[in-house]
Image (tube, coloured by chain):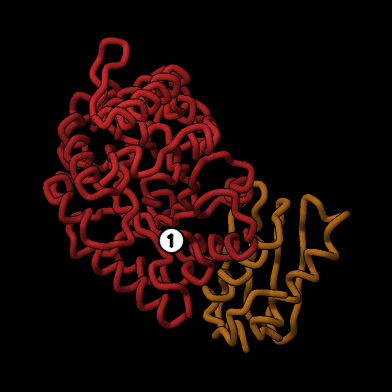
Amino acid sequence: MDITRKASAGTVQSSDLMVFVEPASTLEVDIESTVKQQFEGLIRERVMANLARLGVSHGRLRISDRGALDYAIDARIETALRRAAVKMETSEVVP
Amino acid sequence: MESELKLRRSLLYVPGNMPSMLQNVSIFDADAVQLDLEDAVPLAEKDAARILVRKFLDGYTKRRQEVFVRINGLDTSYAEDDLREILPARPDGIRLPKADTPEVVEHLDTLLTEFEESHNVPLGHFKIIPSIETAYAVLHVFDVARASDRIVALAFGAEDYTASMEIQRTKGGEELFTARNHVLWAAKASGVQAIDSIFADVDDVEGLRRETELVKKLGFIGKSLVNPRQIEIVHDIFRPQQDEIDYALEVMEAISRARELGTGVISLRGRMVDAPVVKRAARMLKTAVSMGLVAEDAVDLSDEMIHGVL
């Protein structure tokens, strides 16, 4: 499943994040966060779980996080990917 | 009966596209929250808000208050997408804006029924609170109130109502008096609750207090709120006061004596106690019991006691 165009989702408010996606031949995930030192690993895990759930294997994602909780990360990634016209394979919740 | 006893003093709006507000829902003491996909969300973010609300509700499993979602009006292209996204997360109900006609409510009822049938949700799970917020709606509110068994309350929306009347909303509220009464008559005649409009000036605590006291006198049992700071004031006003509780208990005791004497009327402190007085006292005491202000076994609120042996 490919990301077919550039898209973004989210806001710059606290407890939120911005997600930027664009087409690419490989899968790249770049994370900036106000809590990067403590939580980059967990955020990355969450992002990757969402990409797997939504069947995305190619694309460039840039995450700019301002302390978002998991549900907001899930929501903003899904919104950005839907906007990038990624066809959903499933709408199940990330376990 | 469920609708009569459920506390809905405070229905707090929470913007649907703000994680910082959504994630505080679990600490708000409001009787209900209304997660807003309509006026608080710009058109370009409708998709983002409904996904955010869905994800939030999926994770908010131990809910401490009723959860309603205010969808976009059924006359917009957003409403059905709103429902498709958020119904699987099982909110308690839908706050329906611009409920101008019974047909609009019937349409929503049909959509909710279709979802319940296809997703194995008990029929009637999703409740409806229609917003009465235009001159047209005020004129049709009784028909709207009876359009669906899912309706638990009618909510008056003064901001949109005054816009539809091309007038300014004032803090005195004189311009709202007749419309509020129309909503109240329809609610009381249909056996559902009546919820008053928001009070937008969050810093004006006295103004909120005055307006809430006024609408309580008129017959509303709750208000929609725009800020969690308003919850405590509104609860304080809608809480039955101790002197009201004491008097109601005296009324029930008096009518109990009357029943023993085989009559339905008796004097209490020089004032007549008869059926309407008893009904009013019993209704207030039921609210007090449900709020834990009076012990359940402290007073007999059976139909026999309230209405006399049939």
Quarter of the figure that contains the C terminus of chain A: bottom right
Task: Residue A92: give x, y in percent of width and height.
Answer: 62, 79
> Which residue lies at the image location 41% right of the left edge and 64% below the top edge?
B126
> Which residue lies at the image location 28% right of the left edge and 39% below the top edge?
B308
- In this orientation, which residue lies closer to the viewer: B200 or A77? B200
Q: Is residue B101 left or right of residue B205?
A: left
Three-letter code, disc 1: Ala
Pointer 1 indicates a residue of which chain?
B
| Residue furthest right in the image | A37
Q: Is residue B244 left or right of residue B268?
A: right
Task: Residue B250: give x, y in percent of width and height.
Answer: 40, 21
| Residue furthest front in the image | B261
Quarter of the figure that contains the N terminus of chain A: bottom right
Mark 1 Cα shell of 10 Å, populated few (<14), some (14-19), many (≥20): few
Residue B23 appears anywhere in the view:
yes
Q: Is residue A92 above or below residue A80?
A: below
Find disc 1 in the rendering and name its residue.
B44
Q: Is residue B222 above or below residue B121?
A: above
* Chain A as rendered: colour: orange
> Which residue lies at the image location 22% right of the left edge and 63% below the top edge?
B104
Residue A13 appears anywhere in the view:
no
Chain that is coloured red in the picture: B
- Tag count: 1
| Residue furthest top in the image | B270
Task: Residue B162: give x, y in percent of width and height.
Answer: 21, 37
Task: Residue B306: give x, y in percent of width and height.
Answer: 32, 38
- In this orientation, which residue lies closer to the viewer: B260 or B304? B260
SS label for mark 1:
helix
- In this orientation, which residue lies closer to the viewer: B266 or A88? B266
Q: Is residue A12 left or right of residue B89?
A: right
Q: Is residue B229 above or below residue A2?
A: above
Q: Where, by quadrant of the figure, is residue B307 drawn?
A: top left
